[in-house]
Image (cartoon, grey):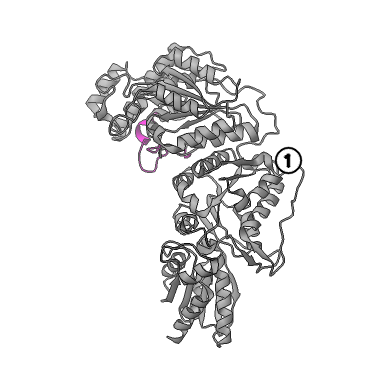
Amino acid sequence: MTLTAPTATIGLDTAAELAAQLRVDSVRSSTSAGSGHPTSSMSAADLFAVLATRHLRYDWDDPRSPANDHLVLSKGHASPLLYSLFKAVGVISDDELMHGYRRLGQRLQGHPTPALPWVDVATGSLGQGLPDGVGVALAGKYLDKLPYRVWVLCGDSEFAEGSIWEALDKASYYRLSNLVTMVDINRLGQRGPTDLGWDVDAYARRAEAFGARVLVIDGHDLTAVDDALTAAADPAGEQPTVILARTVKGRGFAEVEDSNDWHGKPFPPEMADRAIRELGGVRNLTVRGPRPAEGSIDGASPASDPAARPVTTEPTRRAAPASYGVGEPVPTRKAYGDALAALGARDPRIVALDGEVSNSTYAFEFARAHPERYFEMFIAEQQMVAAATGLAVRGYRPFASTFAAFLTRAYDFIRMGAVSGVDLCLVGSHAGIEIGPDGPSQMGLEDLAMMRAVHGSTVLYPSDATSTVALTEAMAATPGISYLRTTRGKYPVLYPDGETFPVGGSKVLRSSDEDAVTLIGAGVTLHACLAAADALADEGISARVIDCYSIKPIDDATITAAVLATAGRIVVVEDHHPEGGLGSAVKDSLVADGRVRPALIHLAVRAMPGSGSSKELLAWAGIDADHVTSAARYLVSG
């Protein structure tokens, strides 16, 4: 049987049949795969059935339509439920569900990813779907200005994650009445009861304290579910809605209902047969609920596909790139703010977020120039990256900035952004011990390693204002997760306007046929390398100096050529811990090339720093010009 409803006219009796089918297919697919989470899927089947048949406005044949509602499965382990829904609406076959789930090379992965066009973001790392949904809802209300709604299904276990409460806090702050969170309160987590169990009143008090409108229902009463979803979709008011649905894990199969023993376990075949019989047998119902209303797109709102967007939709403001005179002392963080504001004037897809340090990161320059596209996330770095992810889902190009040290708090969201395949531009300022007296809690000394490890990432570290402007613009066209590291202090501009800085490139600032040693730096340490080269020249030693502004991908050819030209003698210096940063990137490059056996000295921050002036700390760590000079002299003399 196939049913399609242009409006919410499919009856609850059909929704009940669909709920049973979703349960049966969750059992079948996980048993066939030999792994999965059938019981966590069964508890939420009634919520999904009513939502899909009567409330989710979605054109399943056009998943990129900007008018579509958005459905985010925050409890990603319940993927059998989501994939069973996809079968029920006719976008995947029963054969794919039964033979493609959790198999090598198939798109029905253990937790959902955008390998499926109906999935916006990868989930499964709990506590991330709702924060990502906040970003999508921000786009809908403030940028797209479209009436689509964002429906998020959360599990109760993930409400122990602080990121969930960051999300609710920001959803309330931004008055996201287009965001509806359904919480599947089935009482049980992986190893036993959750911290609140079925205490829905406690959940309600907490959600209300964060500014949400809360509806408490029996998650298996289809009329109550329908009434709650109807109320949640009412745009009156400016609060996000949280529906707290009391459910039973394993609902529909008495042997496992409310049992501690069946989390994340498929049923053996004989047990699955009993479950399917108890649930009424296999069904092949195809049901599609309401589609987006005709006329909900006015033609002026940007589409999900960035290629479909106009080049500009607003008057040009500060469209020319920022420029600086050679030798002028300029912090690279300021150049970032200048560049972002100019970039935003040329491209309406550019949006910016910051973690309440915009007067330090200089993101305030964008906020001042383009307030309608700036989102303050306050001290909530996880939500900042998640909101950026959601905005990217809608085709915007988000730049998110905070201190480099504080991005570590959001690392799981960055990692999952790569799994989602979104394009994010992240900026970490106040990097390294160069920041001086603030001390180690503020010093980003792990960020390069962290960002290099992200799949498909790009890691950039400019040394002056001109290169910062160029690399900020390059990030806007770079796919995947890109990271720009900026410096607190003022350093002289090295390059004239118009100099190009391709991703994967480098600059050779000193070079001759007599070079005896190669000095490689980036950011603040490039200036130390230049000073060291001058000191060495006074001693009759010629040094080649490379600005390794692109740390990932790194310029293998230039590094190899320099090392070959200087008899393998190389000094790498970085304001970072020795593991995983510039030095590791250079070593990896040389090992991969395999043609040279370098005599390499790696200068890095090897002890725990404290407070002090920038000059004192750079000397203490052994990464200032004097130490670079000594290291080079040692290699040449050896």
Q: Residue 448, position in %: x, y?
A: 48, 58
Which residue extends farthest bottom?
540
- Is 559 drawn above or below residue 128 in the view shown? below
Describe residue 602's horizontal placement relative to residue 479 as left or right: left
Mark 1 surroundings: few (<14), some (14-19) or many (≥20) residues within 10 A: some
Q: Amino acid at mark 1?
A: Thr
Q: Residue furthest right?
A: 315
On screen, 20 above or below 454?
above
In the picture, which quadrant includes the C terminus?
Answer: bottom left
Q: Is residue 626 above or below residue 67?
A: below
Q: Residue at x 50, y 55 (%)?
A: 442
In front of the other: 301 or 438: 438
> Which residue is nearer to you in this view: 187 or 104?
187
In the rendered structure, the answer to whether residue 527 lies left or right of residue 286 reads right
Side (left or right) of 293 relative to 205: right
Does the image show residue 175?
A: yes
Q: Which residues are magenta?
A: 93-115
The answer to which quarter of the image holds residue 185 is top left
Q: Is residue 476 visible?
A: no
Magenta segment's dominant SS is loop
Tell me where residue 509 appears, x and y as whole percent.
61, 74
Image quadrant containing the N terminus: top left
Q: Is residue 94 magenta?
A: yes
Q: Secondary structure at mark 1?
A: loop
Whether residue 53 is in magenta: the answer is: no
* Picture coordinates of residue 332, whole percent (x, y): 62, 60
Depth check, front residue: 202 or 313: 202
Residue 375: percent from the left, percent from the top? 61, 40
Please state the total of marks drawn on the protein image: 1
Residue at label 1?
A: 313
What residue appears at the point 59 percent right and 24 percent down from the top-left corner?
292
> Looking at the picture, does residue 531 appear above or below residue 56?
below
